[in-house]
Image (cartoon, grey):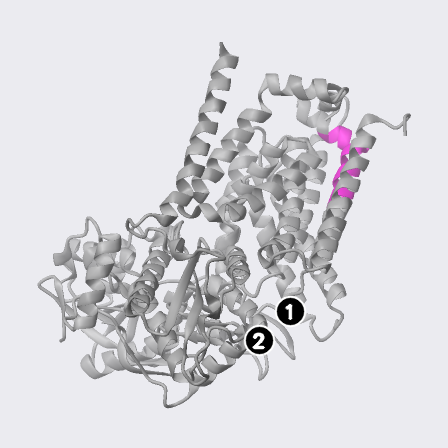
Amino acid sequence: MKNLKKTTKVDFATYIGVTLAFLIVFILQGRGMLTNAMESWLVPVCCFIVMAVSLNLVVGVSGELSLGHAGFMSIGAFSGIVAGMSLAEAVPLVPLRLALAMAVGAACAALAGFLIGIPVLRLRGDYLAIVTLAFGQIIKDLITCLLVGYDKRGLHFVFNLDGLRSVSDLHLEEGGVAIIKGAQGAVGVTKMASFPAGYVLVMVALVIVLNLIRSRTGRAIMACRDNRIAAESVGINVTKYKMIAFVVSAALAGAAGALFGLNYGGLASSRFDFNTSIMVLVYVVLGGLGNIWGSVIGAAVLYILPEALREFADYRMLIYAIVLILVMLATNNDQLKALVGRIIPGRKEADANG
Amino acid sequence: MKKSIRFLALALALVMMLALCACGPKTEQGPGPVSNPGAESQPGTEPSQSGNEPSGEASGTFKLGGIGPMTGGAAQYGMAAMTGAQIAVDEINALGGPVQFEFNAQDDVNVADTAVNAYNILKDWGMQVLVGAVTTTPCISVSQEAYNDRIFCLTPSASSTDVTAGKDNMYQMCFTDPNQGLSGAEYVKANFPDAKIAVIYKNDDAYSQGIRDAFYGEMKDSIVYEGTFTEDTQTNFSVQVTAAKDAGADVVYLPMYYQPATVILNQAKAIGYAPTFIGVDGMDGILDQENFDASLAEGVLVMSPFAASSTDDRTVNFVAKYQEKLGQLPNQFAADGYDCVYAIYEAIQAAGLTADMSTADICEALIATFSSDSFTFTGLTGADQTWSANGEVTKVPMAFLIKDGVYTTP
């Protein structure tokens, strides 16, 4: 262990920590020691951990501000729901169908990320933030116009841009079901997501992101972040490396979206609005930019917090906001940092290495 | 210097938080206005075993859960429905009869996954019957969970047919969207036989879209113009109103909530366009909208099952209690929430349920009662309401004409 690099140790500690947390919760769940409320948090927490980790790749590692991450989640969720519902007969095995749905969600979101990235990642400065902000809104509005149905002949799509079409325009055969009903979003979704599936997704996301960061590609991405001109001068294709980070991030968000979508009986596109994007960004920023295990903890704690504060009733969101401010102050406090540094020697070094 | 300020800020924030923590529970016991309908909930202190009467007579303290948006953009609907339900619970408990209720309302922020979290919190609390969820999308998610868990649900206001589709334990207090569109079409046919009709609706809202689809199906041939808007464009309707005027429409059907309708009325007046406006149940509340000149609503027809200006004793009593709690006139959501609790109360009595029965047994018994032909319910939102086995309510919509700032029967 001694000759392992500091970063490698941190990475392994992240894997082990996540696995241990999963095992403990899983055993508690198996013994029926979790309340219903806690059980209902498990899958969304996994989804938002993956969202935070993937957004950290863009914001923390690649250094671009993305304000439309929920858009990718939305694409993944709805394409995943369509895949999961329409494959019901072809693939009867639920875990396999869930995996396929997540793969479809990831692929669709990655494609969207790629298409957006082509023009946008050539821009500098705040433009990515502005365009991703618009993108999130566009996705929300487009899915509001989308009607999707499934019957024996296959999938049917209608794009209700003029607002004058309805489910009957899908011309579904007898026994066909409408999966996405425009403004109402997806309805009648069969619940497929499970906590172990969420754990697997979190681990896959961690392995992909951590290995990407520690690889040659990852160092190139960080070089672009730290000094674009210097990176270009040594022959790094800045757009290409930013694109890699952006597309990987979009794909992971899509997979998380698919898992999220298949965890509920119904889902409207308005769930993935600007607020959701900002919420994920808050998880990332409070967890620490570029700090992957920080994102994991940030997402888990901050997703559960408003639910756990329900006993304060009306003051719930106020207290939530105060806790956010406290975390910001505490994590930036030099004296606190020095204190932690004294307790855990070598902590400073870890910080320097990210 | 900077450091000390930062420490001061941290310390102040901590103090604030402690102060809040301290006053949080206090308000739960406070006798003040129930801005928090969940205040009645005191887990653990519930005498659920009080039902030792012979079987056949309903008795015991039933745990009613409520789910609705009480914060965020849709908060007014959740607050109204949950406050209405709370008033009914208080009234029933004050009667001192053998059937008592404990009511616990949870916030869902109008988000499907938060609603499922709220549902599970209520399940941990021991909920036996659910009043909710108030809004459609959360209700679809919640109803799926409740269907699997066999908990009876009566939603005050989630009006989509998808809410009840395929779930035998899910009942609605409000009209379904298609039914409302159909009854609107019938009314227009009967009263405005040769009218040219314009429809303006919100196409990113399932409620508005659902009513419009049914209305359009019936009135296809008389509709001369259809205009759409979304959440983001509901502050300006000059395009739609002008187009409706140019198309020569003399009836404008507005399947939407009252906030956008106020803008439409305002802009129609500005261009001197005065057709007959017909609103749906979401239009109820328009007269109480702040900063709205109520004279603009003169002559508007509102097809709603509830009117706060009704003079029957029950409505007057309800309006007074509601105003005491929230300081405003109740709308249709509040009346639906109130009726939900009374409908469950009467069904529990009709079925002779006791609170110590299992939730699944209560669910089956309530399903049997609600779907039976002999069970009729008279509440604020209509007399002799019955439910079909698929959970949809049958009641007569009433049309009100706004005249001199009050609802009148045309």
Q: Is residue A151 magenta?
A: no
Whether residue A324 sits left or right of residue B184 in the image: it is right
Q: Residue at x 64, y 57 (%)?
A: A258
Give the chain letter at badge 1: A
Q: Residue at x 17, y 72 (%)?
A: B313
To which quarter of the image does residue A208 belong? top right
For the stretch drawn in magenta, the main secondary structure is helix
Residue B162, compared with residue A314, is above or below; it is below
Quadrant location of the C terminus of chain A?
Answer: top right
Where, quadrant-wise, is the N terminus of chain A in this rendering? top right
Q: Are marks 1 and 2 on the same chain?
A: yes
Q: CA distance from mark 1 to mark 2?
A: 9 Å
Q: Are marks 1 and 2 in contact (CB under 8 Å)?
A: yes
Query: Is residue A127 among what the camera can see?
Result: yes
Note whether B406 is above or below A152 in the view shown: above
Does A66 sit above or below residue B49? above
Q: Label for residue A93?
A: none
**Amino acid beneath label 1:** Met
Q: Secondary structure at mark 2?
A: strand
User: With B131 as the anchor, is A102 left or right in this view?
Assistant: right
Q: Position of residue A150 (x, y in %)?
A: 61, 74
Chain on which label 2 sits: A
Viewer-proximal residue among A339 and B401: A339
Q: Residues within 10 Å of mark 2 (few under 14, many from 20)?
A: many
Quickly name the residue at label 2: A177
Q: Which residues are magenta?
A: A205-221
Q: Which residue is mark 1?
A: A85
Rendering coords of residue B69 (x, y %): 41, 55
Asked if residue B265 shows in the view, the reply is no
Q: Quadrant of residue A117?
A: top right
